[in-house]
Amino acid sequence: MAAINPEFGKELKNYGAFDFNACYNCGNCTAVCSLSTEEDSFPREMVRFSVLGLEDDIRSSLKPWLCYYCGECSTHCPQEANPGELMMSLRRWLTTEYDWTKLSGLLYRSLPLTIIGFIIAAIGVLIFSALEKFNLQSIMHKGHIFEIIAIAAVFGFILLPNIIRMWWLIILKPKIKVPVIKYLTGFGDLIVHMFTQKRSLGCDDNQLRWFEHFIIVIGYLGLLFTTVFLDWFSNDSLFVIVLGYAMSIIIFIVTIDFMSDRIKKQKEMSKFSQPSDWMFVVWLFLMGLTAFIVRLFIDTGLIEKNIWLYLFHLTILVQWALIIVPFGKWTHFLYRSFAMYFAKIKS
Amino acid sequence: MNKKIGVYICHCGGNISDYVDVEKVKESIETDEGVFLAKTTMFACGDANQKEMVDDIKKNELDGVVVASCSPKLHLLTFRAVTERAGLNKYNYVHANIREQASWAHSDDKPGATETAIHLVKAAIAKVRLAEPLYPFIINSKKAVAVIGGGIAGLRAAIELADMGCPVTIIEREHFVGGRVAQWDVLFTTNETGKEVVTKLYNEVIRHDNIKLLTGAEVISNTGSIGDFTMKIKVTPRYIKEKCNEGHLLKAIAVCPVDVPDEFNFNITGRKAIYHNFPSEYPQTPVIDIKNCTRCGECEKICPSVDFSQKEEILEINVGSVLMATGFDSYTPADGEFGYNQFENVITLPQFKRIIDLNDKKLIFRGKEINKIAYIYCVGSRQIDGENKYCSRYCCTSVIYAAMQAKHKFNEINNYHFNRGIRTYGKQEVLYAESLKGGDIYLQSYEDAPPTVEQHNDKITIRINDILTAKKEMSVEADLVVLVTGMVPRADNSVASLFKLPKGRDKFFNEIHMKLRPVETVIDGITICGACQGPKNIMESVNSALSAAIKSFSYVSKGELELEPIIAKIDKDLCTWSGTCAEACPFDAIKMVKDEKKDVAAINNSVCKGCGMCLPVCPSNAINLIAYSDNEIESMIDALAG
Ligand SMILES: Cc1cc2nc3c(=O)[nH]c(=O)nc-3n(C[C@H](O)[C@H](O)[C@H](O)COP(=O)(O)OP(=O)(O)OC[C@H]3O[C@@H](n4cnc5c(N)ncnc54)[C@H](O)[C@@H]3O)c2cc1C
Ligand code: SF4
Ligand code: SF4
């Protein structure tokens, strides 16, 4: 038996959802949702769970991740309860639930804390550069090493344990039996979803968005690969140089489109932007742009005189790697892929 | 005397002529005795045909008319009007229904349908041969109306009648007017208070010369009928002089040693034997509740306005029409129904409304602060096993509104609504939406699996299998459970039997036709309105009050009334007074009278409805129904059988 907890609804408002209480359970949202199925029907059920504060049921549910926020439900809701935005907020809330450090929860709930985090990262970069006596070569060299260590650490200490927590909440705690073989066979799905978000094609009229999303993932992973593993800034191979340019251009061009959507607020999914949404696109954009300019300056020999540019890029990178990736919206990418994986192996 | 009869046979565009050979019908009756002309017509009710009928009647001086067409329910009045326009008495018109009774009924057998139609028309002709002109009875009607019940409906109706120039007597059983509405603080959907609404009406009532207000008054007998009701009214005094010193009175109330449950507050508080209802009670003179007064005389010592010498009075009034507005009671849950009378903190919605009104800043009940409130809907309404099958209409909106009001007035209130589907129809829906947005939680069940209420160590838990959450079992711990009780008829509705008012299956007073005659009753001259007729909110009560006022006024406005002449008639020579007719009459229209040594039955023309129930029971066949005399009916039967 479940006890009702209206406080949960109030808590959820910190994550963006605001008027889901208006829901009168007509079910229009579920009926229009092109991803909802008979076995996995949403979003009305999630709205209902949220109104009643059935935290355990939400925590063990994968449904929030099955939604790609086309926003049809919000458009059709007669009560303007914004079920689409509620699903988004539940994803934010779930990421904080998976996070063992609980830092993401703090950052979601408090913009000042997030800003302080960003400032500390910037000051860190400055102090580090001062210690390196603003020597570009050694800063760039250590910057590159930092990237490698940061990726390994964030993954090893934060993301991996969080994925394990997610697994525990979704499979182990509800005592769902999954044969080992399924873990292996489902792996292909994980990879496919991670790179393609194939499921979002199920949303009506979503081809362009899917394509944008697809190339930005390619761009992002490509840039990560070129800078971290091919050491783009110090590599003289023409192929690598061009590849890096291409990847960074993809990133900042697509993110410009994402940002303009959020400003125009015409699509349902870009109507309500939380700080975490803005940070994600802006920092991605800045990463692409600054990486591009840094390499341009290297190629034109301007970088020595404009070391601030690299420091700016490094700051963006540190903030991205230490805040946005482990505790911010970046994790959605990871959790969603794993959600597909868990959904597959559960079934 | 041989009549000149005109017969019109209608095609009804094909509805009739597709199955009935109307030409053949015409041919087979046109030579019948008395038939002067016979015609077929595409649409008898069409303007052109109506005009032709008028011309025919005038030109040929017809003195009997038959139209064979659709059901008389549809066009009897139309063709009666045609004959009247042609200067012929309308009872010389007879209607034959050859559509519902012939063409539609026998569409599989055309010759049979035609045969039936011929017989029906012949029977109508037989009847019209014997028809006589009839004229309505004219009776005097006293231009005055009695309004029984001084609630919102009664007051509003009285003002309307008085405005139209009709003298009105309001007969209110309590010592204060306003009925239930006086008991509610703020009201949906206008946010006015009950007090404001009642004040407005009361001020108009007392300024009106045409209105006489009797409080503490009850009808104890009634004789007469439409146009002439004579009632005896018992008026209980207040035992307080009208002009009195307030200061003294308050002290007098303070010293009264009696403490009885206060019905105004639905017994959640007590009151003295000498009491006010609330600061704005109308009339603004307190009352001594003589039934509970011990006559200790304490109040008399302090306040010279107390006057035990006042006496009960019996008044007699005579009116042409009676308007009933006696309102409703709230359903009282059975012991143990959702914990009622079993657990302390289980109360009803009316009680909750009073508690909200009586508390300030904090919601305190039985010494404890209340934060979590559970509302259980449809208690006493929409019953599966019980008798109250109806929905009480007001309660969904009222409880949602009360819950919002509690949240607004007191801190930290959480509301949980255990409902069976919300019925905030019309504009009231806005309140539901507002309540949802405000965070009130709604849980729903079907009638066969209602929520349960349990108490363990001071904690009340309500459980439900919520159908909005796939019937998952949910529980709420609440500080207070409010049973959303519906409306039921007044427990003491004995006044209805004085007037022989019929009640519906729901036991509320019954109208003649829910849609078309919604405030008239089968007892001529008596109208009903407000919640005595069935659950209504204020707007609906006032709507019906205004229509009842107009309807009642229509009975008395001219000082006389025209009544249908088709009623029963006693042949005094044959009558030997067996009394069986009086027993059979559902309207109490037959009384025994003395007629030259013997007892005979007499019909009250203004009460008889011509239903004919008395005819077959008379052992001496002394009763005939005008226009349906034995002769007429027998001649019709002959025609049908011939
Ligand atoms: C808890 C609750 C809250 C409500 N809140 C609202 C609201 O916010 N808004 C709204 O629109 N409606 C509300 N209603 C409905 C409203 O109370 C009714 O619509 C209204 O009271 C009906 O008026 P009435 O005059 O027909 O009957 P009543 O108010 O019952 O008045 C009938 C009067 O007749 C008198 N009477 C009875 N029998 C006799 C007799 N034999 N002889 C003489 N007098 C007699 C009674 O003493 C009474 O004064 C509420 C109802 C309830 C129960
Ligand atoms: S469409 Fe809106 S009101 Fe209807 S169930 Fe979905 S969220 Fe609720
Ligand atoms: S109005 Fe609502 S609470 Fe009242 S009986 Fe009807 S459904 Fe039940």
Image (cartoon, helix red, strand yellow):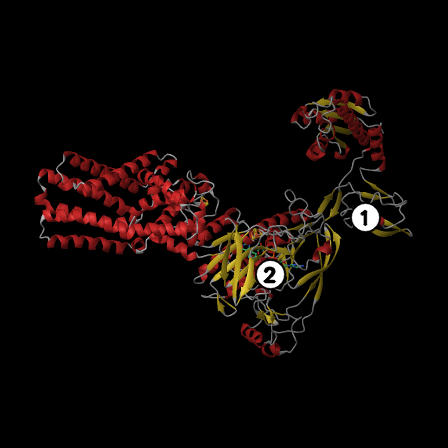
B237 over A193 or under it: above or below = below
Q: Position of residue A294 (x, y in %)?
A: 14, 42
Instruction: Pick whichever, B448 or B322, lies toward us.
Output: B448
Residue located beneath label 1 in the image: B584
The quarter in which the N terminus of chain B is drawn is: top right
Instruction: Pick whichever, B261 or B563, lies toward us.
Output: B261
Q: Residue furthest right?
A: B597
**Can residue B107 be seen by looking at this rendering?**
yes
Q: Position of residue B418 (x, y in %)?
A: 53, 54
The quarter in which the C terminus of chain B is drawn is: top right
**Can residue A59 be seen by looking at this rendering?**
no
- Under circle 1, the secondary element is helix
Distance from Cα at disc 1 to Cα at disc 2 = 40 Å
Name the residue: 82% across, 28% down: B3
Disc 1 or 2, which lies upstream in sequence? 2
Is there one chain holding both mark 1 and mark 2?
yes
In the rendered structure, find residue B177 and report the number of the disc placed on it: 2
Tell me: is circle 2 under 8 Å from ligand 1: yes
Query: As shown in the figure, which amino acid type bears the numbered disc 2?
Result: Val
Q: Position of residue A246 (x, y in %)?
A: 20, 35
> Badge 1 sits on which subunit?
B
- Under circle 2, the secondary element is loop
Foreground disc of the pair 1, 2: 1
In the rendered structure, find residue A54 and report the number of the disc placed on it: none
**Residue A220: which quarter of the image?**
top left
**Is B320 placed left or right of A89 in the picture?**
right
Q: Position of residue B359 (x, y in %)?
A: 49, 66
Name the residue: 47% across, 54% down: B441
Q: Residues within 10 Å of mark 2 (few under 14, many from 20)?
A: many
Query: As shown in the figure, which amino acid type bears the numbered disc 1?
Result: Ala
Figure quarter occupied by ligand 2: top left
